[in-house]
Amino acid sequence: MEELREKLPSLDTSELTSVERDRPRRVRRLGTDQVEQLIAGYRSGATVYELADRFRIERRTVSNILRRYGVPMRRRGLSPEQVDDAIHLYELGWSLARVGRHLGVDHVTVLNKLRERGIPTRDTHGRPRVEAGDAR
């Protein structure tokens, strides 16, 4: 028992113990062949999201690589018909994230299009979102 007590910090000292934290993940570097495959995949129509999944890297990393190699980026957005579809699905109760995945765009793109059309949005708990300037 005495051995254990000696290993514990003293109660009368203000010594802070270090908290063990997860180490930051090491950045996954793609080799030259993988970068060429990524660029070829993008040029053949794969989305940044699909390539991120395929190469197990962040979508921002995919965009950075494409920019670094001078590959023109596609701006995909949503067609008016897709916005109509997004509104319908959202009103059925789908989340912005689910609608975005279904349409192959980021949830913020869906949110922006809903706002452009004047569609009221919900918070993460499904309650009507209170916009800045609204009095309640």
Image: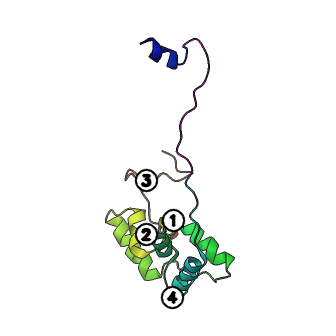
Vertical placement of 126 versus 106: above or below? Answer: above
Tell which tag, 3 or 2, sits nearer the viewer.
2
Over which residues does the magenta segment extend? 11-24
Tell which tag, 4 or 2, sits nearer the viewer.
4
Residue labelled with disc 4 = 44
Q: Marks 1/3: CA distance?
A: 13 Å
**Is residue 86 rendered magenta in the image?**
no
Question: Residue drawn at (45%, 17%), measured in percent from left and top?
Answer: 4
Q: Earlier in the sequence, mark 4 or mark 2?
A: 4
Q: Is residue 11 toward the left or the right of residue 124 in the image?
A: right
> Is residue 16 or residue 42 the one in the foreground?
16
Q: Marks 3/4: CA distance?
A: 37 Å
Vertical placement of 12 versus 127: above or below? Answer: above
Residue 75: percent from the left, percent from the top? 57, 79
Secondary structure predominantly adopted by residues drawn in magenta: loop
Q: Marks 3/2: CA distance?
A: 16 Å
**Whether residue 103 is visible:** yes
Q: Earlier in the sequence, mark 3 or mark 4?
A: 4
Q: Which mark is residue 123?
A: 3
Q: Which mark is residue 108?
A: 1
Do labels 1 and 3 touch, CB within 8 Å? no
Q: Marks 4/2: CA distance?
A: 22 Å
Density class for disc 2 (Cα within 10 Å; few <14, some 14-19, many ≥20) is some
